[in-house]
Amino acid sequence: MAKIHVNTTINGEPTEFLCDPNDTLLNVLRYNLELTGTKEGCGSGDCGACSVTVNDRLVCACLVLGAEAEGAEVGTIEGVAEANQLSVIQTKFLEHAALQCGICTPGLIVSTQELLKENPKPTEEEARYFLAGNLCRCTGYDKVIKAVMDSAETLRGEA
């Protein structure tokens, strides 16, 4: 099978790679580009552990082909930190102990970032609804929602 040459932008950096036509974006990120922050939980788009953005749209990287990144802007957990400083969202997840094993955490943080871009002042119900596609077996979600709500307040300058 012939490899496909892809030109894309990942976390603001122009990037190119070769991949098989059936390689998922998740596998390309993890194995071709060694961006291992994005995790595989289910491989079927049901858990949200591999959440990334493609052209500012939240997607499961296990459901997107690597070739579909051609000409696109891809955002991963590695691009969330700002100048080697944790982002507000990452800091709030730590402060609220909203992580345990870490498999779901990157997807939750990327999803939270997208939620707060779309809706800087979500209600708890809206946050829970938006993050419903991100499954976690360890935290019980309350700490995650507290971290999301605190992040929103901080980003709005209310904290």
Image (tube, helix red, strand yellow):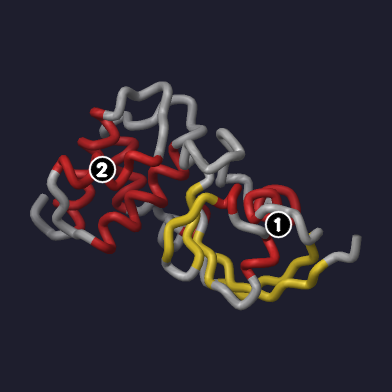
| Placement of 118 over or under 43, stated as above or below | below
Q: Secondary structure at mark 1?
A: loop
| Placement of 94 over or under 71, stated as above or below | above
Mark closest to the chain's N terminus, 2 or 1? 1
**Hey, which quadrant is residue 9 in on the image?**
bottom right
Which quadrant would the N terminus be assigned to in this image? bottom right
- What's the residue at 24%, 39% (across, down)? 128
On the picture, is 30 further left or further right than 124?
A: right
| Placement of 11 over or under 87, stated as above or below | below
The label number, if any, that marks residue 33 in the structure image:
1
- What's the residue at 41%, 51% (across, down)? 110
Q: CA distance from mark 2 to mark 1?
A: 32 Å
On the picture, is 156 further left or further right than 139?
A: left
The label number, if any, that marks residue 129 in the structure image:
2
* Foreground of the two, 132 or 93: 132
| Amino acid type at image mark 2 | Tyr
* Residue 102 percent across, percent down from the top left: 48, 32
* Residue 34 percent across, percent down from the top left: 69, 51
| Placement of 20 over or under 131, stated as above or below | below
* Residue 94 percent across, percent down from the top left: 34, 36
Q: Residues within 10 Å of mark 1 (few under 14, many from 20)?
A: few
On the picture, is 16 further left or further right than 64?
A: right
- Going by the picture, which residue comes out furthest to the left? 158
| Amino acid type at image mark 1 | Leu
- What's the residue at 45%, 44% (across, down)? 107
**Hey, which quadrant is residue 16 in on the image?**
bottom right
